[in-house]
Amino acid sequence: MPDSLPTDLSFLGPIQEPFEKLLKLLNIEHDGTLKCIVEKTQQQWLRPKGTERWDMVETVFENQPQILMCLQQMGFVDTIYPTSTNYDCLLIHGASKQNLVERILHLETLIKQGIRWKNAIFITGCPIASAEITELLEQFEPFDLKFIISNAHKDNTRANTKDTIMAWLETNPEPQSILALSNQPFVPYQHVALRQEISPDFKLETVGKSPPKSVPLSVYLDTVARWLYLQFC
């Protein structure tokens, strides 16, 4: 972790207050510096190594409504819609079957709202996801969808978001407007992951449907910890 991190959280702007409240609600003790906060949230919120999101169990807190309100104010809960109607590229982030369903449901809504694109790409680290999304898209009017599948790591762990992005970039895409499709609570994290790897010449929006109530709070916190580290470290 770099030593030149900000010494306070004022750079967070409008999400500083709900984030500080979130830390307090979850009893994250820190010295007020970003470095300390990142270290503490990595220790306490990240899922154990080798554990997938769908293996995470619910952690119930008495103040859970207040915690969810903070997460909502930080942008990890509400549905996010496009600001335009036409894009050069629709980029669909791969996911588990359940999250793919959520993403395709949102895509259906966007199509009904008149959202259109020239090219569509599906990036994933799971080979069977190609068959899953093909099945989910059978209800739509057919459109060309290019598949980019990343290989697993040498330790057999699956490719992550960055791996799939880098595999797509190896195809040397031209700067263009991109509508990236995710779902909550992963939209902020996947937006940052993609924005950091593409040049400023790309125009990027990341959208996604609000999560079902069944999503464990532990999944939210794991995602916030990853977003915080990626965004600011």
Image (tube, grey):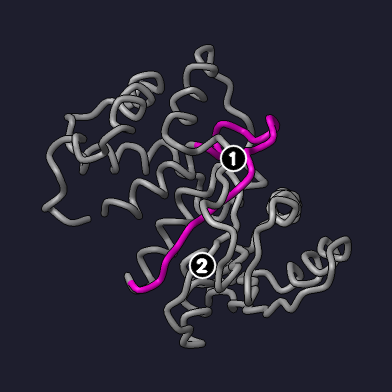
Mark 1 = which residue? 79
Indicate the amino acid at tag 1.
Thr
Residue 88, percent across and down?
Answer: 55, 73
161 in magenta: no
Quadrant where the N terminus sits is bottom left
Relative horizontal placement of residue 102, taking residue 178 as reference (left or right): right
- Position of residue 126 relative to residue 99, above or below, is below
Relative horizontal placement of residue 119, taking residue 22 as reference (left or right): right
- Position of residue 192 relative to residue 151, above or below, is above
Q: Rounded to the nearest whole Å, what is the CA distance between mark 1 and mark 2? A: 18 Å
For the question of whether residue 98 can be seen, the reply is: no
Q: Quadrant of residue 115?
A: bottom right
Residue at screen point 42% across, 78% down = 175
Quadrant where the C terminus sits is bottom left
Q: Which residues are magenta?
A: 201-220
For the view shown, which residue lies furthest in the top direction?
62
- Position of residue 232 relative to residue 139, above or below, is above
Indicate the amino acid at tag 2.
Ile
Question: Residue 110 — which label?
Answer: none
Q: Quadrant of residue 132?
A: bottom right
Residue 162, percent across and down?
Answer: 46, 67
Image marks 1 and 2: residues in contact by CB distance under 8 Å: no
Residue at screen point 70% across, 32% down = 214
Question: Residue 178 — which label?
Answer: 2
For the question of whether residue 207 can be seen, the reply is: yes
Residue 2, percent across and down?
Answer: 17, 56
Question: How many residues crowd around disc 2 within 10 Å: few (fewer than 14), some, or many (20 or more)?
Answer: many
Q: Quadrant of residue 11?
A: top left
